[in-house]
Image (tube, grey):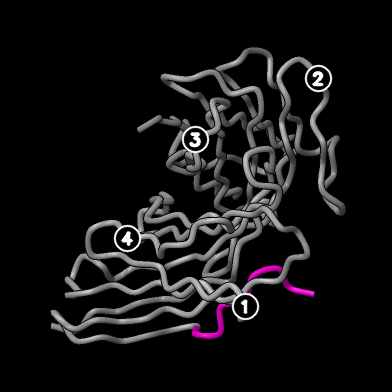
Amino acid sequence: GAVVSQHPSRVICKSGTSVKIECRSLDFQATTMFWYRQFPKKSLMLMATSNEGSKATYEQGVEKDKFLINHASLTLSTLTVTSAHPEDSSFYICSARDPLGNTEAFFGQGTRLTVV
Amino acid sequence: AQKITQTQPGMFVQEKEAVTLDCTYDTSDQSYGLFWYKQPSSGEMIFLIYQGSYDEQNATEGRYSLNFQKARKSANLVISASQLGDSAMYFCAMREGGWTGNQFYFGTGTSLTVIP
């Protein structure tokens, strides 16, 4: 099946710095990718929908200036957590849908962010 | 209202036994898809099984089957012959709009523990 690769899998950063997380579709072109956040033992919360060549659509309550999303190509979307704070520590996971209409949505491996 | 409801925060099953994980959904769309994902402790989301709203037969994938009861709006996952490696979080999800739908709605998950 299609593969979505997310990098890095783990990152530790200092408060106030920025962290970039990459989500790549390896064998298909994804015009739309999705970014989720997951707190420990909780469900996935959709943060934003990333559209290739246009601005991302953010869910209510998600700060677009803090969580910058760029979808510059059909195979790459990036999420940058700017001026990170300890409360941004979480598990972030992306997904992409095969535009040919495959029923699956493919998820990246996730990124565990710890802000110290 | 919750789109997806999973009422079992935790379940235990004896190895080699079958287990049913409950999921109910809420939608007014005629076209929708129902998904089950497995999330081991590593965090990746592993697609298990899919049921389309127009599918008349219950979906099956190896040891996984989906008990789809449309009138009751339930989509329970049945795992037969449980294995130790089945211990994980299980999420039920729905995508409204069929092929054109994008956003997933996830349930809160069920933590399954398989006992040797």
What secondary structure do most residues of the magenta stretch adopt?
loop
Q: Are marks 2 and 3 on the same chain?
A: yes
Q: Quadrant of the N terminus of chain B?
A: bottom right
> Which residues, given as a range, are shown in magenta?
B1-8
Is disc 4 in contact with disc 3, using a CB cutoff of under 8 Å?
no
Which numbered disc covers residue A54? 2
C-alpha span from label 4 to label 2: 38 Å
Q: Are marks 4 and 1 on the same chain?
A: yes
Q: Are marks 2 and 1 on the same chain?
A: no
Q: Quadrant of the C terminus of chain B?
A: bottom left
The reply, left or right, for residue A14 in relation to residue A103 is right
Q: Amino acid at mark 4?
A: Thr
The residue wearing badge 4 is B60
Q: Amino acid at mark 3?
A: Asn
Q: Is residue A9 above or below residue B67?
A: above
Which numbered disc covers residue B71? 1
Secondary element at tag 3: loop
Q: Is residue B3 magenta?
A: yes
Q: Picture coordinates of residue A35 (x, y %)?
A: 64, 41
Q: Nearer the viewer, residue B43 or A66?
A: B43
| Mark whose residue sits in front, 4 or 2 | 4
| Mark whose residue sits in front, 4 or 1 | 1
Secondary element at tag 2: loop
Identify the residue at image location x=53%, y=76%. B69
10 Å crowding of disc 4: few (<14), some (14-19), many (20+): some
The residue wearing badge 3 is A102
Which circle's residue, 4 or 1, is located before the other in the chain?
Answer: 4
The reply, left or right, for residue B93 in relation to residue A50 is left
| Mark whose residue sits in front, 2 or 3 | 3
| Mark whose residue sits in front, 2 or 1 | 1
Secondary element at tag 4: strand
Identify the residue at image location x=41%, y=19%. A27
